[in-house]
Image (tube, coloured by chain):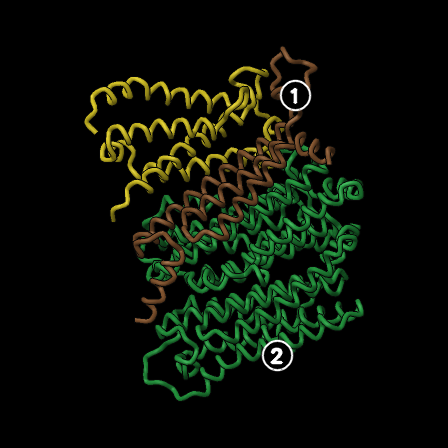
Amino acid sequence: MSILIEKLIINYPYFFAVILLVIGALTVLTRSSLFKKLFGISIMESAVFIMFIAAGNIRGGTEPILNGHNTGAVYINPLPSALMLTGIVVSVSVNAFALALIMRLYKTYGTTDANRIAELRKEVADR
Amino acid sequence: MSSVTANLPVLVVIAPLFVAFILTTFARRIRLVEGLVIFIGILGFVGAGFLAANVFIKKTPMIYQVGGWPAPWGIELKAGNVSAFFLLVAAFVSVPVSLFSVNNLSDEVGGKERVTRFYVLYLLLCGAMAGMAVTNDLFNVFVLVEVATLSCCGLVSSRNRPRAAEAAFSYLIMATLGSTLILGGIGFIYIITGHLNMGFAHEGINKIWQSNPHVVWMAFSFILVGFGVKSALFPLHVWLPDAHSAAPSPASAILSGVAVKGYLICLLKILYNVFGCTLMREFVIHRILVLAGTVAIIAGSILALMQIELKRRLAFSTVAQVGYIIMGIGLMNTKGLSGTLFYLASHAVIKSVLFLSAGAMIAASGKKNINELAGIGRKMPITMAAFTIGSLGLTGIPLFSGFIGKWNLIVGSLELGNVIPAVVIVVGSVLCAAYLFPVIRVAYFEPVPEEDWKDPRLTQKIALISLALAVLILGIIPGPFLELAERAAVELLALK
Amino acid sequence: MKDFILKRISAVILPFICIYGFYVILHGHISPGGSFAGGIIVGLSLIAFATVYGMKKARAELPEKALVSIESYGTLWYVIMGLVGIFKGVPFLANKLAGVNVGEQGTLFSGGLILLISAGVGIRVASTIVTLFFALVEDES
């Protein structure tokens, strides 16, 4: 048991990432507000970003910039951070696109609740 | 000339993207835009054909190092048989689809100025598909998947209806969920191997999977579920029918025909080129795939039977057909894999012709339910003939392209000594006939209405005829194409 | 907004924020940051301009057409820089291999094409951020 807790403490970024991932997935799947679905997606993406960046980190390492002062130091792995920058760009574009769609839906239906929109659509279809 | 050949793997990806960003300059001159799109489509097809011929004759994959950096450090593109095969399919289907949308879109997307936006997204999707075919780098897979997803959502929402915006939103949310899981899966592979290049990741993961079985499990499950959402594998398909039936018809054709296949090719590449056969057997992934495939075939077909709207029925049929492909991926023998690849190609062509002809019928008549289309076959002979050829092909009648794929799948599953997939394929074909033939019956054998329904314009006829011909040609003389599929299967199985 | 102090102070500060953004873009290859981070800074300074001086004035300064063409040409610029390699007979996006003078390590003009690429991408990111802001704020029509 103590080994498990020790492992959790040592690997806390991963633990954190798992919690965030679950929170995000639950939010996406259970909330009917379109905004909350979008927040859930963002939280899930952040969880994966944290996992990647934690994987690239080396404790006690320095930033991987060659400047003449830190020769021989341990560098952290810059690749995951660079990759996650791309991931963040992607997530920004997803957010922007989703917000634009939410605005369009709000203009049409006057609400941002997915269940309410489904009801309204049914009413329109019945008429 | 040789420099063009050597650079082909990157050029097929760059060319559509390049044109996509030029298009906004000519936003007002729609004729020029459409001409450019068709031109780049044909150029892409020629390029893909050239690449495929090159791979086919030389029998070695073309490896391309972007920026001149060698593999573990730089990004590598690899055009092997699988890539050449899918590239050819995607490039072929995109030409008739763009031909079909000439002069046809402004009603559906709501205004002339939006047409250019549609084409920009369309070309981005084509570029992403080509990229998925040739990439050999795991992170590139994620980026291209995202590019494809965003442009798909854009294409769906480009239809000027509130329903399209709603479908696009749910598609966006589900698809982003999927790509987040894919990124997580790639992350797990990267964490335990330290490589993003598929070849190096394969070596790494085969060395250390025994000490980290849980991480490999996580990677497998994240990637399977992620790509399952993306490619609408049965229980995860909920976004597809809305999205594909709400999109403008050319967009539905390209989404159902090619975009879904792009994700499947990525899944195939990751499963076979990164994890490899040993790991798949060890973790029983192939059984899971076969099971998921059989369930998807039956459930998708039954759901399709229950639809009364034509485009929705076709969309649910895609769910069933994805089942065949997933099942074939799990068979893990040459026959099964070549069958699944050939089926993927034939479904790309067939679903495009079905969606395009359905779109033409719906546009001409203004009706979207199947029983309202009574007698349309007499009024629109060419459109309905194309639809009929497509449905015969999808059902798997001999001499049509679907048959060869299904036959190989059946042989592949019998080789394994497993009867259930074979039975399910046959049952699926019967169900497919049950949901597609009523359309044909209603269209031809019901009394002809008085309405003024006409075949579409010449360009659209050409698009329909060329796709229908492709269904027939693939069915009668599969020849080199089938051989390319077989070689691709051998290439996939060669990695242990 | 008619706030005098806000307008004066932002008139003094915004040019410096903008210049700092360009500094980050151009030094992307020798220090932390780069085209995305710098582009965001430039874009945010423009957004601050729009919020302080009002949408109308911002629109007059940054017409939609210009933003859209900057966006597409920024991406095109990247592709063209990549094609330099192909025209020189070496792979796509090649830098030193293509015979570009990569300069001395640690100075601004090192890294060859990377400076040019990140300049294009940075401007593109800035215009994208501004376009997104405008699209989400102006919701009449």
Residue A88: % across, % down? 51, 37
C92 relative to A59, above or below: below
Residue B446: % across, % down? 43, 87
Q: Which residue is most to the top?
A: A69
Looking at this view, is B85 or B180 the one in front? B180
The chain letter under disc 1 is A
Looking at this view, is C119 or A120 the one in front? A120
Q: Is residue B124 left or right of residue A79?
A: left
The chain letter under disc 2 is B
B300 relative to B237, above or below: below
SS category of the residue bearing label 1: loop
Chain B colour as displayed:
green
Looking at this view, is B190 or B367 the one in front? B190
User: 10 Å neighbourhood of mark 1: few (<14), some, or many (≥20)?
Assistant: few
Chain C colour as displayed:
yellow
Closer to the camera: disc 2 or disc 1? Answer: 1
Q: Which residue is most to the front?
A: A1
B186 relative to B226, above or below: above
| Residue B40 visible | no
| Residue B245 visible | yes
Q: In this view, does B36 lie to the left or right of B46?
A: left
**Circle 1 is placed at which residue position?**
A61
Looking at this view, is B160 or B39 the one in front? B160
Residue A83: % across, % down? 58, 35
SS category of the residue bearing label 2: helix
**Circle 2 is placed at which residue position?**
B430
Amino acid at circle 1: Gly
Amino acid at circle 2: Val
Chain A colour as displayed:
brown
Q: Residue at x 42, y 83 (%)?
A: B378
